Image (tube, helix red, strand yellow):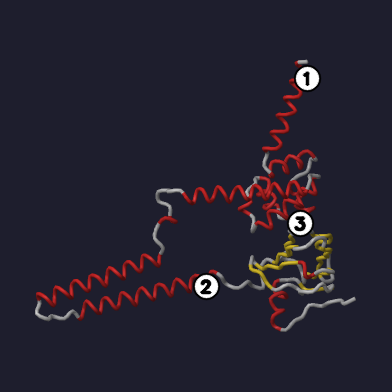
Amino acid sequence: MDSENEQAQDGSADLMETAAASVGDRLRAAREAKGLELSHIAAETRIPERHLDSIERSDFDALPSRTYAIGFARTYARIVGLDEKEITNAVREELAGGEGRHSRVSGGMEPGDPAKLPSTGLAWFGGIAALILAIGVISFFSTYYGAGADLPSLIAEGEGAVQEIAANEAATSDAEATAQAAPTSEGQVVFTATGEGAWVRFYEEGGERLFEGVMEDGDTYEVPRDAEDPRLNTGRPNLFDITIDGQQVPPLTEEMVPVASAPVSAAALLSRGQGEDVATNES
């Protein structure tokens, strides 16, 4: 009887431990149970090994976006034999929990927290207001006690300070615009599926196949930067979002028209807005 109770307690403890384990721990345990290396998973899924390592550590902030985290985890679960839907739901819960913790930390009164300091615009406004007030006070006392003595130099200095502030704000705006520069022809191209069951075939023109299979909602594929003239065949090109260096570019087509041998290098995708069209096969 005691033996049965101990076994029941051990089973309950195992269930509680599994439920409490993070998504990354569960995926890593399933991989190790199959005797697979992380590099093998990367080769099978075409997901960079650094992203898989982030998933195993449940460090979803290291991934490009929430969509990447969900799609990569689902593909990983499929390879190691875990329930894809269960893993996907668990990832969403962990992401939601991380956002809640971030909100609570951000709302606290942390000493030295930059978020609690006045904004740059407010600081400049305060400086200008103080300068104008100082000029008004000096002008009043000079007029009252100095029999109309003027203050040409002080006024000129005030105008110069205002001009300097305006120039600094313009320089800041230029710097922010430069930081959001357009993607380049050497950028990283990423396809993200936005619908269920889209078959694709990525390959090099006249060369080897890069990837072929069905991409589900949230699945992503990074076109290798060193691929020679990468191309795409798919019957549902309208179900893919395309980004270059994280910035979205127009889709291959907005209609469900099959495309064949469509160029998908960064240079080819960027040149589409300059007169080049995507080859389509209308049935």
Side of 202 relative to 109 (left or right): right
Q: Secondary structure at mark 2?
A: helix
The answer for how far apart the CA atoms under marks 3 and 2 are is 34 Å
Near mark 3 (Cα within 10 A), the count class, few <14, some 14-19 or many ≥20, is: some
Lower sequence index among marks 3 and 2: 3
Judge whether residue 259 can be spotted in this image.
no
**Image vertical order of residue 38 relative to residue 241, above or below:** above
Q: Which mark is residue 46?
A: 3
Lower sequence index among marks 3 and 1: 1
Q: Amino acid at mark 2?
A: Ala
Q: Secondary structure at mark 3?
A: loop
Near mark 1 (Cα within 10 A), the count class, few <14, some 14-19 or many ≥20, is: few
The answer for how far apart the CA atoms under marks 3 and 1 are is 47 Å
The answer for how far apart the CA atoms under marks 2 and 1 are is 69 Å
Q: Quadrant of the N terminus?
A: top right
Mark 2 near mark 1, Cβ–Cβ under 8 Å?
Answer: no
**Location of residue 29 in the rendering, given as x and y in whole percent from the top left corner:** 73, 39
Mark 3 near mark 2, Cβ–Cβ under 8 Å?
Answer: no
Q: Amino acid at mark 1?
A: Glu
Residue labelled with disc 1: 4
Residue at the spot x=69%, y=34% of the render? 17
Q: Which mark is residue 97?
A: none
Q: Residue furthest right?
A: 283
Q: Quadrant of the C terminus?
A: bottom right
**Location of residue 203 in the rendering, given as x and y in whole percent from the top left corner:** 82, 66
**Location of residue 71 in the rendering, given as x and y in whole percent from the top left corner:** 73, 55
**Location of residue 210 in the rendering, given as x and y in whole percent from the top left corner:** 80, 62
Q: Secondary structure at mark 1?
A: helix
Judge whether residue 140 can be spotted in this image.
yes
Question: Which numbered mark, 2 or 1, is in the foreground of this view?
Answer: 1
Residue labelled with disc 2: 177
Lower sequence index among marks 2 and 1: 1
